[in-house]
Image (cartoon, helix red, strand yellow):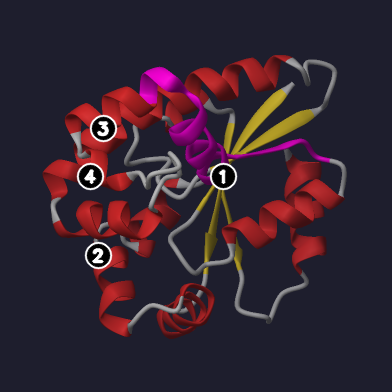
Amino acid sequence: MKTIALTGGIGTGKSFVAGIMKTMGVPVYFSDVMARRLMESDAELVDALKRDISPAIYDSDGKLDRKILASMIFSDSDVRRKVESLVHPAVVHDYLKWNEGYADCKYTVFESAILFESGLADKFDVIVGVSAPLELRIQRCMMRDGETRESVERRMAAQMPPEKLSELCDFMIVNDGSVNLHDRITDILESV
């Protein structure tokens, strides 16, 4: 089995591309979704986040307050690094267990916005990046998340620049509406 990592900055449509892959029958591990689940269901991780970050990131029902956490992460790089040092190992452990269930598949996909930043890139056979023009990315994020332009730009500044991402990936998918994504994904999967 080949392991494929799918990555790209916010607003590139990486999760949309991963969704297409899933409809094509490719098993996809959505790391952001799973990280949020683990940050509410993994008691050891929850305790560490409350202790090392702040109990304020959880509401009275034990639900993660993503807005509070995001504001802390994107305004303080030390907090971001600390959260990543706690969450990434839990996600990797969960992914490895998940991946074992697909040993008979030709390939699986691990979708992650911060693949390189988290030091996970070397764990995969192939890396596919998703890109889109900056203004389109900003507009997508503002519409999807209801954020201000400044907030989106601050989040983007904390991620790898698109030029660097394209240098590190084996394949790139431009998600700007000009390419048939299903055909591009099929071409990549046939090349793997």
Badge 4 vs badge 3, beta-carbon distance below 8 Å = no
At label 4, the amino acid type is Arg
Q: Are marks 1 and 4 in contact (CB under 8 Å)?
A: no
Does the magenta-highlighted stretch encompass residue 30? yes
Q: Residue at x 48, y 56 (%)?
A: 8
Report the Cα–Cα distance between label 1 and label 3.
20 Å
Q: Write down the residue under mark 1.
A: 33
Q: Report x, y in % for residue 168.
A: 42, 46
Q: Which residue corresponds to mark 4? A: 80
Residue range highlighted in magenta = 26-45
- Camera-nearest label, 4 or 3: 3
- Quarter of the image where one finds residue 146: bottom left
Residue at 70%, 14% in the rendered image:
100
Mark nearer the N terminus (4 vs 2):
4
Local SS, label 2:
helix
Name the N-terminal-most of marks 1 and 2: 1
Report which residue position mark 2 lands on.
157
Q: Quadrant of residue 179?
A: bottom right
Q: Is residue 159 visible?
A: no
Q: Count residues near mark 1 (Cα–Cα under 10 Å), then give few for <14, some for 14-19, many for 20+.
A: few
Disc 3 marks which residue? 50
At label 3, the amino acid type is Lys
